[in-house]
């Protein structure tokens, strides 16, 4: 039995899934959080096996077990996780993981595939923290703790940036002093790559068409949001850049902005570098425009006739259309457009607005299909549409598990 444990570690929490890769079914998942605080907590959910591969875990929920206790560090957090498996199942003795897969946000230009974690790789992840100071150090903490908990199995790093290593130089190069950019590793890296890869491959399989023949645009729309142009399975353009700040309007992030606006705020408003960082990452986007970061709250405001919410929604959709048009041009046409993540999967108004003006390119959304709810992959374009428009639930953990198993041998 091929069992893989997938870990997504943050600075004060980590999520995990235990996946049976023979059936591609989740056996258990959990969250350990408030690490380092006086009162930590853990949640462990056990799933009954689905009757067939791909049937989905939501229908087969077994039970969730929660507890509160001090969790001083990530090593203690993994001990809590192992205890939860021992008490509530599934037994790690009966179903031991053959490998542990780790989500790592930034791989820079060094990592372009799933990578067995060695001491040298740990040093590289640490050195790349300069490009992702909020993420890579936390990812590394999780790796160290997991290797302590599971010392006898391979550990594999799967990088958010790896899928975008196929970007051509014209797409990843910023037009600034070349020597300065090279010395400080300033270029576009892209993010959400694990999700974009999973969704593009799932869309091709759903349509029964070879991935190598398709031109695709994938919108990953959550609190963080990005869009990628994928030409025959390869990322050729993506909206996020050096950091996850560039590109689309997001829940609290600005996305694209004239750099001179920041110089203006520094000179005229006396804002420091840290002030500007806080503004762009935490006080911009939907929350900056409308005071809410959740699309459900924003749509409720629009339906009430709130002017701020309406403007924020219009700005959000305007940016989506702009990128859709740009990527149509970069690809020279498109066969498939997919929406994924929390907003992409659950906000019909966003999907309709983003593609409303693309009829000239053969894009036709069916209003009834777009409004219909569903758990799995579904098509929302009309039968006459030259472009297939899909809603594809993402599964980054499964993609990490697949890549982990391939790298672990």
Image (cartoon, rainbow, N blue to C red):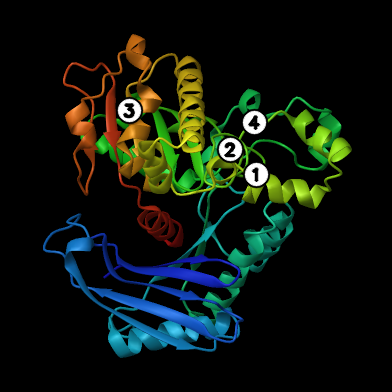
Spatial CA span between label 3 and label 4: 30 Å
Give the structural element (helix, strand or loop) at label 1. Answer: loop
Q: Is residue 132 above or below residue 171?
A: below
Spatial CA span between label 1 and label 2: 7 Å
| Crowd around label 1: few <14 · some 14–19 · many ≥20 (10 Å) | some
Q: Is residue 315 above or below residue 122?
A: above
Q: Which residue is mark 2?
A: 240
Question: Counting residues from the N terminus, which is met first, the one under dot 1 or under dot 3?
Answer: 1
Question: Counting residues from the N terminus, which is met first, the one under dot 3 or under dot 4?
Answer: 4
Spatial CA span between label 3 and label 2: 23 Å
| Crowd around label 4: few <14 · some 14–19 · many ≥20 (10 Å) | many
Q: Which residue is mark 1?
A: 243
Query: Nearer the viewer's eye, disc 4 or disc 2?
Result: 2
Q: Which residue is mark 3?
A: 352
Spatial CA span between label 1 and label 3: 28 Å
Give the structural element (helix, strand or loop) at label 3. Answer: helix
Q: Position of residue 18 (x, y in %)?
A: 34, 70
Q: Which residue is mark 4?
A: 172
Give the structural element (helix, strand or loop) at label 4. Answer: helix
Query: Nearer the viewer's eye, disc 3 or disc 4?
Result: 3
Q: Quadrant of residue 178?
A: top right
- Name the side, left or right, on which 241 lies relative to 266: left
Q: Position of residue 75 (x, y in %)?
A: 56, 82
Kindly identify the residue that appears in the image at 69 percent across and 47 percent down.
279
Pick the residue in front: 303 or 408: 303
Question: Counting residues from the N terminus, which is met first, the one under dot 1 or under dot 4?
Answer: 4
Q: Are marks 1 and 2 in contact (CB under 8 Å)?
A: yes
Spatial CA span between label 4 and label 2: 10 Å
């Amino acid at each position: 039995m091929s069992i893989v444990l997938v870990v997504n570690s943050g600075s004060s929490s980590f999520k995990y899934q235990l996946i049976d890769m023979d059936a591609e079914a989740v056996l258990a998942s959990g969250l350990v959080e408030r690490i380092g605080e006086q009162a930590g907590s853990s949640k462990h959910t056990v799933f009954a096996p689905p009757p067939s591969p791909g049937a989905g875990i939501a229908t087969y929920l077994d039970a969730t077990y929660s507890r509160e206790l001090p969790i001083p560090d990530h090593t203690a957090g993994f001990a809590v996780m192992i205890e939860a498996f021992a008490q509530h199942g599934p037994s790690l003795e009966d179903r031991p993981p053959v490998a542990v897969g780790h989500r790592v946000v930034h791989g820079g230009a060094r990592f372009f595939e799933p990578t067995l974690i060695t001491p040298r790789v740990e040093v590289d992840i640490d050195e790349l923290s300069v490009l992702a100071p909020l993420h890579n150090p936390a990812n590394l903490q999780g790796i160290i703790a997991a290797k302590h908990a599971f010392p006898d199995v391979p550990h594999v790093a799967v990088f958010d940036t790896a899928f975008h290593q196929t970007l051509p130089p014209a797409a990843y190069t910023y037009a600034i002093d070349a020597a300065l950019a090279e010395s400080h590793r300033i270029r576009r890296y892209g993010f959400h790559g694990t999700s974009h890869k999973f969704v593009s491959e799932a869309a091709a399989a759903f349509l029964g068409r070879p991935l190598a023949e398709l031109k695709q645009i994938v919108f990953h729309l959550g609190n963080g949001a990005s869009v990628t142009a994928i030409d025959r399975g390869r990322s050729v353009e993506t909206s996020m850049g050096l950091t996850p700040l560039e590109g689309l309007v997001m829940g609290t992030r600005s996305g694209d902005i004239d750099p001179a606006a920041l110089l203006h705020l520094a000179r005229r408003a006396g804002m420091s570098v840290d002030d500007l960082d806080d503004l762009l990452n935490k006080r911009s986007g939907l929350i900056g425009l409308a005071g809410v970061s959740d699309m459900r709250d924003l749509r409720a405001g629009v339906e009430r006739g709130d002017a701020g919410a309406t403007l924020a929604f219009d700005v959000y959709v305007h940016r989506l259309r702009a990128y859709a048009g740009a990527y149509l041009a970069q690809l020279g046409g498109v066969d498939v457009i997919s929406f994924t993540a929390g907003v992409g999967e659950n906000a019909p108004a966003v999907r309709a607005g983003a593609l409303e003006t693309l009829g000239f390119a053969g894009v036709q959304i069916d209003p009834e299909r777009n409004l219909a709810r569903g758990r799995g992959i579904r098509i929302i374009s009309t039968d006459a549409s030259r472009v297939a428009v899909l809603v594809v639930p993402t599964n980054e953990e499964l993609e990490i598990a697949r890549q982990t198993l391939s790298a672990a041998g």
